[in-house]
Image (tube, coloured by chain):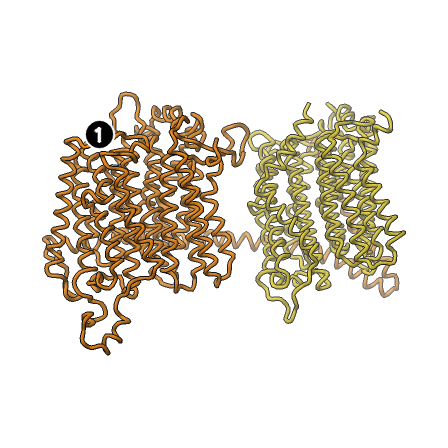
Amino acid sequence: MNYSQLLKFAAPETIVVLTALAVLAVDLTSLRGLEPRLRFIIGGMLACVGCAAAAVWMIVMPEQANAFGGMLVVDPLTQLVKVALLGLTVFTILISIESNFTQHVGEYLALILLATVGMMFLVSAEDLLMVFVSLEMTSLSLYILTAFNKRNIKSAEAALKYFLFGGMSAAFLLFGLSLIYGLSGATNLGGIAAALQGRKLDPLLVVALVMVVIGFGFKVAAVPFHLWAPDAYEGAPTPSAAFIASGSKVASFFIFAKVMIIGFAGATGSGAFGYYESGWVPMIAIVAVLSMVLGNLGAIVQGNVKRLLAYSAIAHGGYALLGMLANSQQGVAALVYYVITYGMTTLGAFGVVAVVEQATGDSKLSDLSGLCRRAPVVSVCMLVFMLSLAGIPPLAGFFGKFYVFLAAAAAVKNLGLLWLVVFAIAMSAVSLYYYLQVMKRIYISDPPAGAPRMRVAWLTQATLAVLAVSVVLLGCFPGWLVGLIERALASLAP
Amino acid sequence: MTWIVKNLWLIPALPILAAGLSSLAPQRCRRFSATLAIGALGFAFLVSLCAFAHTLQPGGHDGAKEVFNFEWLQFAAGDPGSLKLGWVLDPLTAVMLVMVTFVGTLIFIYSVGYMAHDENFTRFFTFLSLFAGAMLGVVIANSLLLLFISWELVGLTSYLLIGFWYHKPSAAAAAKKAFITTRIGDVAFLLGMVWLYSQTGTLLFYDQGHGCMEQSALAKMVVQTTSVGMAVSTAIGLLIFLGAMGKSGQVPLHVWLPDAMEGPTPVSALIHAATMVAAGVFLVARVYPLMGVHAEGAAVETTALQVVTWIGAITAVFAASIAVAQNDIKRILAYSTVSQLGFMMMGLGVGGVAVGMFHLITHAFFKSLLFMGAGSVIHGCHEEQDIRKMGGIRKYMPVTFLTYAVGMMALAGFPLFFSGFWSKDAIIHAAYGWSVSHVPFYLGVAGAFLTAFYMTRQMALVFWGDYRGHGSPPPPHSKLPQLIKVKSELKPHESSRPMTVPLVILAVCAVGLSIIGTPAWPWFQSFLGSHHGEGFTYEVIKIMVASTLVVFLGLGLGLWCYGRPPRQTAEEPDVLVKLPLGMHTWFARKYGVDELYEMTVIRFNAWFARACAFLDEWIWGGAVALISYALLGLAWVNRAFDELVINLGFDQGCERVSRGGQFMARLQDGRIQNYLRVIGVALVLLVLFLIWGGAK
């Protein structure tokens, strides 16, 4: 393998890095004097073009490669996830364009792109070192993005909490990874699995396993590693929060599942009802249950939409973990479908919150009152997003949950994980309550007296509409995306 | 595959598109929505004509059936896990397409006149278009599932249109009744469909030998028997027939159809005479291979077809006898429709697809003509529907009178020149030759007699004699011009052009259609491919003469009872009251079927509903409330934990510290400490948990 080949395999990432630099350079050199909105439009378009180019590159030139023993793995599945990531990035940029929280447009966009690069490498990594480095690259960018609203003290506070929490988790993760290296002598996931094969689950391995789960649990905001999420979502500028909730979730879940399923193939254990066996599956099952309970119950009493979405994200993390602990090909397919559609939906929901925030200055539930009369198009989009998050057919959220539950139920013989699925369905019913609370605010409550119609930029409206339509279409024709994922998975099977 | 087969979906899609567009139009866009609806259906009519012409070509294709199938969704791996939909173009489809679009277009045009003063004109045309699209979907479906979907849509639009004047309680109740009654049949239909799917693994009718109406699937089903000793094919056929009974108003599910006349008259003409109610007959014709399949060496008539025949024959007489004693002009026609649908079912049972379908087509024309004529009369008489309060209308509404007379002749089966005669004769002839029993034949003859009688009664009361409405206005040639001027507004008047022109066209069709199905030239029968007429044999002529005599007997008796002398006032009792055994009361009260249902099914249902409500409110509701309170409690605990344990402790800390002037420093530190502590605790707990589990 020489460097030109490596460059070819890493071409999409390279394109995005170059785009980030270009955006930064253009903004610093020639756009300084212009008003922020114009800079956002020009820079944003440039960034979108870069992302689109990287995505097109992957679609037009599908590759299959494994460079340096798992440092960079390119295959149909990772490419699919990367294209999805780029898509989410583009939508994040589009909903950022109308925001006015910062003067540092170039830096903001460049950071989003760099975070994307980190996620793309993360998706492609099958080596512990690469996993950790790209995870840190993503996280560091996200910390800064959280702090980006310098006029708001909450933003800084949120970022610092996020950073401290993230730093601590990263420390645990690194500790866990080094223990694993000590146990197995390998950093490659396949090598680790081979070395751990047949080994008893001794306390050292357990500690390593738990530490790794802590590290990733932080990234996916699973209980009890979720404590940063509500504060960070609330304090961060809304587009940043949207990005944390969508793109970062997709990449983190993907790599989490990969590390667990490939790396710890020998230590799965069993969470089937009545057949408990120690391993990562029962641990994830506990984490999933806690996430579903705490996320859903916590969301009920929230008064701020962003906090509500944060708790909802925790709950959805719980559902998605079901797909992971199914520990099967079907489970992975369900997980990928779930997180991609969830990412789109939550991105849209945050987009709507951004619109409201810009008009009213805050994102309390009461700020949504009578939104359907103040901004009808946006309200319809929010209806789609909320119902999809609640899992109402025929929206994408329903099929996501359906596939995940199906995979979990079918994973173990005799429906061993059915208890978990039944629990998840019950919790999903609870979640309808708070999503409908939002809808009630929008559609039934009266707008504040004398409130004018909101002026929503057409670009934002179009972006939200595209997202809403995609959520509906992916729900009506789930076969398309699932087919893509399954074909990609099938091509990996030996 | 030709263009027309591939694009057959256009025919239902156009009206549905029109419905979608006009549902978005504001209420005042009357002209827009009417034009859109008529244009879409008119275009669908042209496409249907193309399709029809295509089926006329001498076919080299298999069984003259061309299908287009596609996969709708894949719910499990492999071929049985994929659900396919599709459409089929065969003579049956083509004939129905042309009939539905043609009659439909005429009725749409008529509606422009009839509904001209209604403020919800736009909504009306939206529903009509949606109905037309759904009905055409039923017709082209090559999959029982697609047929069922369209079938339900048809039911929905029927509900919407019966209850179009929903502010009238009777209309709202009638809509509900129609919906629920047909739904009873539909449940059976759905069961039959599911069963069929479990047996054959497909719901496509025709699929190059793999469809459920094709030989391999049928042969498999006919040899299996159910627990009661009936062939599976028969059981499925009967379940599907129950669905058809609901839609086509066969006894005992006929009760909704007369009440459905609460809807606007064009609706009655389109849905409850020409098209939707015929969908049941069409469904039986469509699944005829399933109904008619019999095991090797068994008797010729299958159980399923026998049931169809008996139900049809009983319905034919039963409804006709009720029609004799009704006084509402539309209700008479409604019972007549039920009776004629019985004839069609009987025709299917005894004579096959062609016999039943021929009557369906001719009936569609003359019955919609009669309904639209009735609508014209009602319109002209200022929304009066009681025939006792009419009379002498022929002087005021000549066009309506003439066309109505043509429709009446066709329905009564007046010999030779009217289509109804030939199609009804074919059914009676087939019943005569039925190998199982002769009773349906006699029932059919009795039905024909009653039909002639009650139609004569209606004609006599509506069009002859003097006008009896609104007290007694002076005759048209009164010498008191002042009085005439006042009263003239109360007098009937001829309807507007959009209403009369369709009447004339339909009248021409009611006569002209007779040429396509006579025994001398049975083009229609051979087109549908199941029947080869034998010409005017001795037997054919014998039956024809007999039925002619019966018809004349009915007409004569009707004239003798009601035309001699014509009824003078609205109040005098009906001639038939003198019949022995209180028969007239029975007829007038519709044999008490409604009351019977009221006392049994509905009362039980109400009781059961109350019991369920009680259970729901106190037992399940209590449980749900308990759970929801428990969940809310948990949520509050959770919040309390969040606020009191994590936040409050920290807040208090902050307050104390802010006094010390180190607010910022301790702000982040204090709170995040708690957060990070959680990670540590989680680490310990999870490790202990896993080790404990491993040690076990």
- Identify the residue shown where x is 20% and y is 70%: B476
Residue A263, how many percent across, how many down? 75, 29
Is B431 drawn above or below residue B268 in the view shown?
above
- Identify the residue shown where x is 80% and y is 52%: A42
Name which residue type carries label 1. Glu
Quarter of the figure with the N terminus of chain A: top right
Is A105 drawn above or below residue A77 in the view shown?
below
Residue furthest bottom in the image: B482
Choose between A105 and A258: the one closer to the eye. Answer: A105
Choose between B661 and A454: the one closer to the eye. Answer: A454
Residue furthest top in the image: B297
Quarter of the figure with the C terminus of chain A: top right
Residue A422, how many percent across, how many down? 57, 41
Residue B280, how many percent across, how many down? 34, 42
- Identify the residue shown where x is 58% and y is 38%: A419
Tell me the quarter of the picture where residue A171 sits. Answer: top right
Q: Determine which residue is flagged by label 1.
A: B534
Indicate the colour of chain A.
Answer: yellow
User: Circle 1 — which element?
Assistant: loop
Q: Chain of mark 1?
A: B
**Other-residue count near label 1 (Cα within 10 Å), few / some / many at <14 / 14–19 / ≥20:** few
Choose between B383 and A105: the one closer to the eye. Answer: B383
The answer, for residue A294, to whether it is visible in the render is no
- Identify the residue shown where x is 36% and y is 36%: B92
Q: Say whether residue A365 is left or right of residue A171.
A: left
Q: Say whether residue A357 is left or right of residue B236.
A: right
Is A373 drawn above or below residue B408 in the view shown?
below
Indicate the colour of chain B.
Answer: orange
The answer, for residue B204, to whether it is visible in the render is yes
